[in-house]
Image: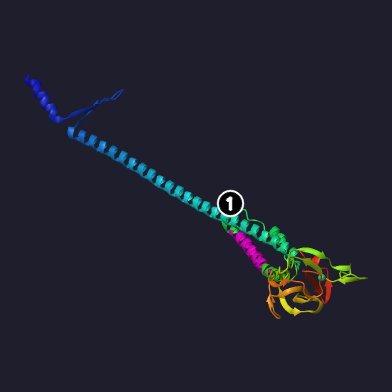
C-alpha cells in the first residue's frame, strides 16, 4: 500500500508521458509533458477559439446593422420622394381642373357675348375663342412625363386663357356700353298706352265724325276713358309744348329721340310745362274734351320727322 501511494505521488509530480510507437520498426520514444504545459495549451486554444467566434459574431452583427440602416434609409427616401411626387401631381391635377373650369367659363362668356351682340345688333367678334381653346391642349400630366414639362404646359395654357379672358372683358365692356345705349333708346321709344280705354277711332282715313260729306285723314288714335283719367308719357322725353294748341285743345307734345315725337290732345289740363324732362309712364296731363272733339278722349299721335305714323305700331 505504501509503495502504491508513493507511485501515485510520483506520477502527480511528474505529469504525463507521451509514448510514440512506430508502426513497423524502430524504437518507441517517450516524451514527458508537464500538467502545466497541457493546461496552458488547452487554455490558449479555448481563448483563441472564443476570440475568433466573438470577432466573427461581431463582424456579422455589424454587417447586418449597416445593411439594415442602408436599407431603411433608401426605403424612406424613396417613400418620401414618392409622396412628394404624388402631392405635386395632385396639385397639377387640381390646377388642371381649375383651368378647365376657367376655360368653360370663358367659353360661356363667348357664347353670351355672341348672343348679346346678336340681340343688340352690334359688330362681330374678331377673336375666335373656340379655335384658341382647341389649339390649347389640356395638359394631361403624369410623374413619368416630368413635372417641369407639365408645369410649363400648364403655365402656357393659363397664359392663353388669361389673354382670352382679357379680350372677353374688353368685348363685354363694349357690349355693356352698347346695352346701355340700347336701354336708353328703348326708354326713348314710345311703347306704352297713354291711358287704358276704348279705341273709338283708328289712325287713317275715316268719314267726317262731325257729320256732313266727305272723309278726313285721322293722324292719331282716339282712346276714350272716364273724364279726368291720367295721361302718361309713352316714353322718356322732353316737353316741347304744353297748353292750348288749336283744334287739339289743351295738348302736350313730347320730343323723344331721332325725330320721334308724341302728341296728346283734348286734355282737360296738363301736368307738365315746356322744357321739362319726363320719364316713361309719368303723368303729363288729364283726359278731357277741349278743342275739336265730340266727347272725352285722348287724341294720341306719334310723329316721326314731322309726319304722323300709325301709333298702334308703337303700342305694346
Ligand atoms: Zn283724334
Q: Residue furthest bottom?
A: 275
22 in relation to 295, above or below: above
Give the x, y percent position of residue 214.
93, 71
Camera-side residue of 201 and 35? 201
Image quadrant of residue 132? bottom right
Q: Quadrant of the C terminus?
A: bottom right
Is any atom of residue 34 visible in this view? no
Q: Which residue is mark 1?
A: 144
Q: Residues within 10 Å of mark 1 (few under 14, many from 20)?
A: few
Q: For mark 1, give the secondary structure.
A: helix
Side of 155 relative to 275 (left or right): left
113 or 167: nearer the eye? 113
**Left or right: where 195 falls relative to 12:** right
Residue, far top: 1
Say whether residue 252 is magenta: no
**In which quadrant is the N terminus drawn?**
top left
Q: Quadrant of ligand 1?
A: bottom right
Q: Residue furthest left?
A: 2
Residue drawn where x is 42% and y is 47% of the image: 72
- Residue 224 visible? The answer is yes
How many numbered badges does the structure rendering display? 1
Which stretch did the figure color magenta?
151-171
User: Magenta stretch mostly in which secondary structure?
Assistant: helix
Report the side of 116 relative to 221 (left or right): left
Instruction: Give the image location of residue 173, x and y in percent.
Output: 67, 69
**Percent x, y of residue 227:** 73, 68
Amino acid at each position: 500500500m505504501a509503495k502504491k501511494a508513493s507511485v501515485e505521488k510520483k506520477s502527480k509530480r511528474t505529469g504525463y508521458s507521451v509514448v510514440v510507437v512506430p508502426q513497423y520498426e524502430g524504437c518507441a520514444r517517450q516524451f514527458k509533458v508537464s500538467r502545466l504545459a497541457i493546461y496552458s495549451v488547452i487554455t490558449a486554444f479555448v481563448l483563441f477559439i472564443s476570440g475568433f467566434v466573438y470577432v466573427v459574431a461581431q463582424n456579422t452583427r455589424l454587417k447586418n446593422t449597416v445593411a439594415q440602416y442602408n436599407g431603411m434609409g433608401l426605403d424612406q427616401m424613396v417613400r418620401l420622394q414618392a409622396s412628394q411626387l404624388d402631392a405635386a401631381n395632385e396639385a397639377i391635377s387640381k390646377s388642371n381642373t381649375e383651368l378647365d373650369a376657367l376655360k368653360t367659363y370663358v367659353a360661356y362668356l363667348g357664347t353670351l357675348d355672341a348672343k348679346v351682340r346678336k340681340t343688340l345688333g352690334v359688330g362681330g367678334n374678331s377673336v375666335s375663342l373656340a379655335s384658341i381653346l382647341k389649339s390649347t391642349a389640356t395638359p394631361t400630366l403624369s410623374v413619368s412625363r416630368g413635372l417641369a414639362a407639365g408645369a410649363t404646359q400648364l403655365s402656357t395654357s393659363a397664359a392663353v386663357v388669361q389673354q382670352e379672358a382679357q379680350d372677353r372683358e374688353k368685348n363685354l365692356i363694349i357690349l355693356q356700353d352698347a346695352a346701355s345705349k340700347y336701354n336708353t333708346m328703348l326708354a326713348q321709344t314710345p311703347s306704352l298706352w297713354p291711358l287704358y280705354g276704348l279705341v273709338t277711332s283708328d289712325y287713317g282715313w275715316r268719314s267726317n265724325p262731325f257729320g256732313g260729306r266727305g272723309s278726313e285723314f285721322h293722324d292719331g288714335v282716339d282712346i276714350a276713358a272716364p273724364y279726368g283719367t291720367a295721361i302718361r308719357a309713352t316714353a322718356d322725353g322732353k316737353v316741347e309744348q304744353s297748353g292750348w294748341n288749336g283744334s287739339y285743345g289743351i295738348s302736350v307734345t313730347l320730343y323723344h329721340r331721332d325725330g320721334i315725337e308724341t302728341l296728346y290732345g283734348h286734355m282737360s289740363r296738363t301736368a307738365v310745362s315746356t322744357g321739362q324732362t319726363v320719364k316713361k309712364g309719368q303723368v303729363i296731363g288729364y283726359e278731357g274734351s277741349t278743342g275739336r272733339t265730340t266727347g272725352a278722349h285722348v287724341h294720341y299721335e306719334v310723329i316721326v320727322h314731322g309726319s304722323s305714323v300709325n301709333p298702334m305700331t308703337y303700342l305694346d
